[in-house]
Amino acid sequence: MTTKKTAFRAAAFGALLIGAGAMTACTTTDPYTGMPVRNNTGTGALAGAAGGALLGYLTNTNKGEQGRKNALIGAGIGALAGGAVGNYMDRQQADFRRSLEGSGVAIRRNGDQIVLVMPSDVTFAVDKSDVQPQFTRVLDDVARTLNAYPQTTIDVVGHADSTGPDDYNQALSERRAGSVAGYLTGPGRVLPDRVFVAGQGERQPIASNDTAEGRAQNRRVEIILRPLTQ
């Protein structure tokens, strides 16, 4: 049963990566994260697994944050409570700082959230969505730390600058997020039940798109880590 479940997840996520850039921009907003995800009905994505996997929650059937929590608790991963949350995220942040020093990945802390910011110039070649071979070692370090802290959920979100058409930037941000998530959930790495994948296109800049430096900052993939709480 475990082998069949793993095979299904791998097939479904492979279809996600293939379909991410091909589907039209028919989206809905996830009510728990506020992030846009593909609309099953609008894209006709339920036609079959080969072409029907979507950006969004990878494996839980409820397609929402509560569904993800339920899947993790069902997998034996307990939720954090009370004062344990802050300490847990503090230790995780410290481990990321040690393991990612000199990697080019920035680490931000927003309350109980940790955000890993992966700039495109170290993660991808220009206008490409395949993770550069030299960066896979960094993602291996990320995966090891994530596995040491299973009581966190993982959102992988792609972003683009404003150069080029909106729909192209949206698709590129989705493909890049899918590539990072695909690597992290590869064999022996991160449990797919923990992962949500989305592309934000050019909608969430962190710098001005009027300068080359600002556009470089806006081209990024963020991994947002949140504590699993009840």
Image (cartoon, helix red, strand yellow):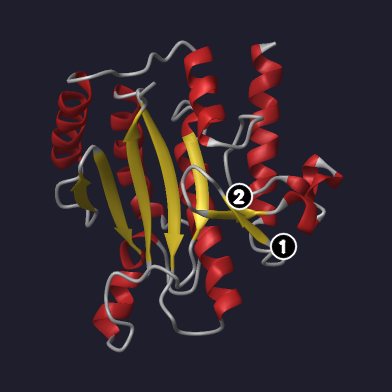
Instruction: Give, as a three-letter code, the residue at label 1.
Output: Met
Q: Residues within 10 Å of mark 2 (few under 14, many from 20)?
A: many
Q: Is residue 129 visible?
A: no
Compared with residue 62, is residue 75 higher up or lower down, i.e. above or below?
Answer: above
Q: Residues within 10 Å of mark 1 (few under 14, many from 20)?
A: some
Q: Is residue 64 visible?
A: yes
Residue marked by disc 2: 55
Q: Is residue 84 above or below residue 205?
A: above
**Residue that badge 1 annotates:** 23
* Left or right for 198, reference 7: left
**Within the image, what quadrant is residue 22 found in?**
bottom right
Q: What distance separates the C-alpha of mark 2 from that of mark 1?
A: 10 Å
The kind of residue tagged 2 is Leu
Residue at 44 percent of width and 48 percent of height: 156
User: Most extreme residue toward the bottom, as rendered?
Assistant: 210
Q: Secondary structure at mark 2?
A: loop
Secondary element type, mark 1: loop
